[in-house]
């Protein structure tokens, strides 16, 4: 793994500067059935396709960003900082 | 050794012929096996030794057969030596340096006489895959293993513990990287350079030019090319550097030997927008019995010896060649002054004869006496990097080579690596020579007979054949043997070369030293602002992550750890002690919604904390696993101060920031770990502080678990009244620049109370007596607060928080294990990690254990299976191989009511 990841703030950087934060998932509501919680906590879609995922630019601007990455080719189609106030389903704290 | 080989008679010493390039004055001296040798400035280790008469350069991997120079281009395994302690260096690629110390390897006692060469007469004991067949029984393997381990492998690693060579890493970004400095690479570099591109030209030979350097009548063109290149400012040349891998994202791994005197190798990460592979083609050996004898040499190697080093390779040569190539080489040899006895076609060769060195060649056209067999082998495009880039390799029957097709868009291939100028030749003689001495793989002594046997055993696909026989898996990574192996496999199975295919090319190729991959031996060290003060006090250091922390302090009376820790412990319990806790992670949170965020991420409730109060909490993930713990202090309505464990700061900060995203909450998070922090603790702590501050320190005015902003000795600080070590105490956070000043002020003020600085070891003992856990020591990646006996810290009545759903479910079922305290009944002290048994059955393990002076027994924390914890109070702990009795305790080992904390 040695691809470049374009950081929205710092520009294209080696992927080793980043911490992988996992695929974007929807947090179930507190009263959701156990299966939903199990899926949320323990399983991953691990899709062989373009996937929306979290990255943290540890050795750069130290900000969380979202990336659309093709998990087969490691081609990064798009990266962007999530908005502070609205997430459009990227993230789901209460 | 310096002069002779074979029968003690000196080899024909180099007869200098006028037409040869003068190697220049012999000015450099170096050592080989403790003997002095001289070398010319352009010499490699191999050429200097060859000129001095040395012929045997190594012993083969399995049979310990003598091996001499074969390719002279860094492609074969025959000249691996140890240079200045570094094993497996190719002598033909290593320029001679003054004072260099070279040793042979894989031979005992000497290259000339190697006792293990008897192995070649035991080859009937070791057919292909013999270790799978003969050593399949565990007993047989265990009996043979020590011997096999001793004799297997090439070279000796540098001795451990010695200051070895230094390595470094560097990073480069270029528009175009051209790999290979032959004519095709030079033309490509010129073209891109003229177009204004910033070009990096990487060449693994000692000078630019590729085969133009040593083949006939090229020189004018080469000189022009190089002059044109130098005239361009935009082309940078990395000479003598090998490119060992082409990775995703156009990343090239390039190894640069001795870039400056401080390091032996530099690994350069080259990121190129465009990659031009011009690695050319290399010559490979032909297959006939004893084709590995010393003195059987590739024609390109012969040309290199003559033209690059001014050496006549032998005195009587036989040339094995098809077509006009034989004539070219014959002319070269004759011009240099060597007799050419005969030129024979490849399929006429019967076998080479000789002992250590070749003495003759038997052919269908007659037997010839000679001391040099020049083999004009097949030229193979060096497609490794292209295959790594994702190119498809297809057999081109016209060219007799696997050629790269379907290159990815950013990679292009030029020159002979594309198969361009190669001419077709039969890849193996029409009847391949199957013989136990016809070597295909020189790296691990695999013969054509071995391959045939393996194929007949069913390993008839090229990939399993490779793994079973280890052909193509040695130091040359298949460069010398791949084509022959594929041809044999195709012949035996009556398949085409295309259908047989090649094995997968993977980096690194050529090999890279582990030191170069590991890089510089730099380790970042973090020091607290009080570091020098500890040094003056005689601190004995320990590493905690990147941090240095005093483990304990030596005193005039003793430097023994046990005594020092004991005294430090007593000072805290009986008088007063001072410890540097600056390594704690410290986060400053400001904003209206801090309480909402903290309620959300921490399991405890923190929004209702009153300003001036402190609360302990753990941080769980969504699975209810404890990630961290610490104290949360509310300084003001809109301001909190968090401490995290030493190693978890980055994680906690990222975790909090992540959960903030998308909430719109008004929280600003600042890492303030640069602050100095100390903990003053002990019955006399208040008396010491009173001398330095006007702050009300009374039990009522500054109660346990509260915080104040105050001044001590004029330093503004945040004081937390907390008690990790179990005594009245204050943790003080203040700007680092006042660190030493306040530390010394506190020690001075504490002098009359016999204050002692204490280290991590005493702190661990003190906290263990209080049964305070350390996250990451007493807990692991499966620990939840319920099992850790800390269920009280999870406020399940909060509507939601990270991990609540999991903790609810965990609470509804029986726990599997429990963290308990235990006290030993005898005098022994178990080690951390010791096994716990109940009625002879394994029931758990110790996480921390220390001798507790107040109890005069060892105490500790341990994980126990939940059903055992319920049913038993008596357990056994394994100490020094014996089982010792211990009793489970359900409260702290010291001051269980916490009265001393609140005093």
Image (cartoon, coloured by chain):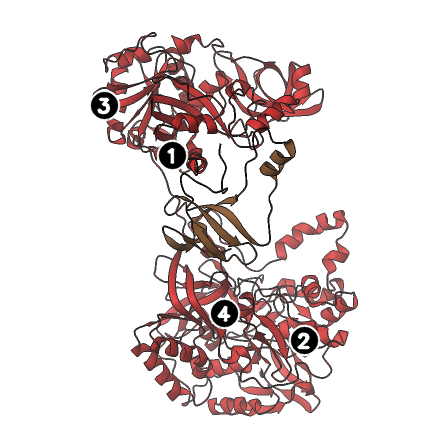
Chain colours: A brown, B red
Image mark 4: chain: B
For label 2, the residue is B498
On the image, which quarter does residue B743 sit in?
top left
Residue A1 rendering spot, x and y as whole percentages: 51, 55
User: Can I make out residue B681 in this image?
Assistant: no
Residue B897 rendering spot, x and y as whole percentages: 48, 8
For label 4, the residue is B409
Question: Which of pointers 3 and 2 lies earlier in the amino acid sequence?
Answer: 2
| Circles 2 and 1 in contact, beta carbons < 8 Å | no
Nearest to viewer (mark 2 / mark 1):
2
Image mark 3: chain: B
- Mark 3 secondary-structure assignment: strand
For label 1, the residue is B548
Question: Which of pointers 1 and 3 lies earlier in the amino acid sequence?
Answer: 1
Nearest to viewer (mark 4 / mark 1):
4
Label 1 vs label 3: CA separation? 25 Å
Residue B130 rendering spot, x and y as whole percentages: 74, 60
Nearest to viewer (mark 4 / mark 3):
4
On the image, which quarter does residue B212 sit in?
bottom left
Crowding near the residue tagged with mark 1, few <14, some 14–19, many ≥20 C-alpha atoms within 10 Å: some
Q: Residue at x 57, y 67 (%)?
A: B476
B714 or B761: which is nearer to us? Answer: B714
Label 4 vs label 3: CA separation? 64 Å
Is B766 located above or below residue B121 in the figure?
above
Q: Which mark is residue B715?
A: 3
Question: Which of pointers 4 and 3 lies earlier in the amino acid sequence?
Answer: 4
């Amino acid at each position: 793994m040695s691809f470049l990841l374009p950081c929205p703030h710092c520009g294209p950087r080696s992927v080793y500067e980043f911490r992988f934060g996992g695929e974007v998932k929807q947090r179930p509501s507190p009263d959701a059935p156990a299966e939903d919680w199990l899926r949320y906590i323990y399983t991953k879609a691990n899709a062989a396709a373009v996937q929306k995922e979290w990255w943290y630019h540890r050795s750069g601007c130290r900000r969380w960003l979202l990336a659309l990455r093709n998990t087969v080719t490691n081609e990064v189609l798009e990266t962007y900082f999530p908005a502070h106030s609205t997430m459009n389903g990227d993230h789901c704290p209460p | 050794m310096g002069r002779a080989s074979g029968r003690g008679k000196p080899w024909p010493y180099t007869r200098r012929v006028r037409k040869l390039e003068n190697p220049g004055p012999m000015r450099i001296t170096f050592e080989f096996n403790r003997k002095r040798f001289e070398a010319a400035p352009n010499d490699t280790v191999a050429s200097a030794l060859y000129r001095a008469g040395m012929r045997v350069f190594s012993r083969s991997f399995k049979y310990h057969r003598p091996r001499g120079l074969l390719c002279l281009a860094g492609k074969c395994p025959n000249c691996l030596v140890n240079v200045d302690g570094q094993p497996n260096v190719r002598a033909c690629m290593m320029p001679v340096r003054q004072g260099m110390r070279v040793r042979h390897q894989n031979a005992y006692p000497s290259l000339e006489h190697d006792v293990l060469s008897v192995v070649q007469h035991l080859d009937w004991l070791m057919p292909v895959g013999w270790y799978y067949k003969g050593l399949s029984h565990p007993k047989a393997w265990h009996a043979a293993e020590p011997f096999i381990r001793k004799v297997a492998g090439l070279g000796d690693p540098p001795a451990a513990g010695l200051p070895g060579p230094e390595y470094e890493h560097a990073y480069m970004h270029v528009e175009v990287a051209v790999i290979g400095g032959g004519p095709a690479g030079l033309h490509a570099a010129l073209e891109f350079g003229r177009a204004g591109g910033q070009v990096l030209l990487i060449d693994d030979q000692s000078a630019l030019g590729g085969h133009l350097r040593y083949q006939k009548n090229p020189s004018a063109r080469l000189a022009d090319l190089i002059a044109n290149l130098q005239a361009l400012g935009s082309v940078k040349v990395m000479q003598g550097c090998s490119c060992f891998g082409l990775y995703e994202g156009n990343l090239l791994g390039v190894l640069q030997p001795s870039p400056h005197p401080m390091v032996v190798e530099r690994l350069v990460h080259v990121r190129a927008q465009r990659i031009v592979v011009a690695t050319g083609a290399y010559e490979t050996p032909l297959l006939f019995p004893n084709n590995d004898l010393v003195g059987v040499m590739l024609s390109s190697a012969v040309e290199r010896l003559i033209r690059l080093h001014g050496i006549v390779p032998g005195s009587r040569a036989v040339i094995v060649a098809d077509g006009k190539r034989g004539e070219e080489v014959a002319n070269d040899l004759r011009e240099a002054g060597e007799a050419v006895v005969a030129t024979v076609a490849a399929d006429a060769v019967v076998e080479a004869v000789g002992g250590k060195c070749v003495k003759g060649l038997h052919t269908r056209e007659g037997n010839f006496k000679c001391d040099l067999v020049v083999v004009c082998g097949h030229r193979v495009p060096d497609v490794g990097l292209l295959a790594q880039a994702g190119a498809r390799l297809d057999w081109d029957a016209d060219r007799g080579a696997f050629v790269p097709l379907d290159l990815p868009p950013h990679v292009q291939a030029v020159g002979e690596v594309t198969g361009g100028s190669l001419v077709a030749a039969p890849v193996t003689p029409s009847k391949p020579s199957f013989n136990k001495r016809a070597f295909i793989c020189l790296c691990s002594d695999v013969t054509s007979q071995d391959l045939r046997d393996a194929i007949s055993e069913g390993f008839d696909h090229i990939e399993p054949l490779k793994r079973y026989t280890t052909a193509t898996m040695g130091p040359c990574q298949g460069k010398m043997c791949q084509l022959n192996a594929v041809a044999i496999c195709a012949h035996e199975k009556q398949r085409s070369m295309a259908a047989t295919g090649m094995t997968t090319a993977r980096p690194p190729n050529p090999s890279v030293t582990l030191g170069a991959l590991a890089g510089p031996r730099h380790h970042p060290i973090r020091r607290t602002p009080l570091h020098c003060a500890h040094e003056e006090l005689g601190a004995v250091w320990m590493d905690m992550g990147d941090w240095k922390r005093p483990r304990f302090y030596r005193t005039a009376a003793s430097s023994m750890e046990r005594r020092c820790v004991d005294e430090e412990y007593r000072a805290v319990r009986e008088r007063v002690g001072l410890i540097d806790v600056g390594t704690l992670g410290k986060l400053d949170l400001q904003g209206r919604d801090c309480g909402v965020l903290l309620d959300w991420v921490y399991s405890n409730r923190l929004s209702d904390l009153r300003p001036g109060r402190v609360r302990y909490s753990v941080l769980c993930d969504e699975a209810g696993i404890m990630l961290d713990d610490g104290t949360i202090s509310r300084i003001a309505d809109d301001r909190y101060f968090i401490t995290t464990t030493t190693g978890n700061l980055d994680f906690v900060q990222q975790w909090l920031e992540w959960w903030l995203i998308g909430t719109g909450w008004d929280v600003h998070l600042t890492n303030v770990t640069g602050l100095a922090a100390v903990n003053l603790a002990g019955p006399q702590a208040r008396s010491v502080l009173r001398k330095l501050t006007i702050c009300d320190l009374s039990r009522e005015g500054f109660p346990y678990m509260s915080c104040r902003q105050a001044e001590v000795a004029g330093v503004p600080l945040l004081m937390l009244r907390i008690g990790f070590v179990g005594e009245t105490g204050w943790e003080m956070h203040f700007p680092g620049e006042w660190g030493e000043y306040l530390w010394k002020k506190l020690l001075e003020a504490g002098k009359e109370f016999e204050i002692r600085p204490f280290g991590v070891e005493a702190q661990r003992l003190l906290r263990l007596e209080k049964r305070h856990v350390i996250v990451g020591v007493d807990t692991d990646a499966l620990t939840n607060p319920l099992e850790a006996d800390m269920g009280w810290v999870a406020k399940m009545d909060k509507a939601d928080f990270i991990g609540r759903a999991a903790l609810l479910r965990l609470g509804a079922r029986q726990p599997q294990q429990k963290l308990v305290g235990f006290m030993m009944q005898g005098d022994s002290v178990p080690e951390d990690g010791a096994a716990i048994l109940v009625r002879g059955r394994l029931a758990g393990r110790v996480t921390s254990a220390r001798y507790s002076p107040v109890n005069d027994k060892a105490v500790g924390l341990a994980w126990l299976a939940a059903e055992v914890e319920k049913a038993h109070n008596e357990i056994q702990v394994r100490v020094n191989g014996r089982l010792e009795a211990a009793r489970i305790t359900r409260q702290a080992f010291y001051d269980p009511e916490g009265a001393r904390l609140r005093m």
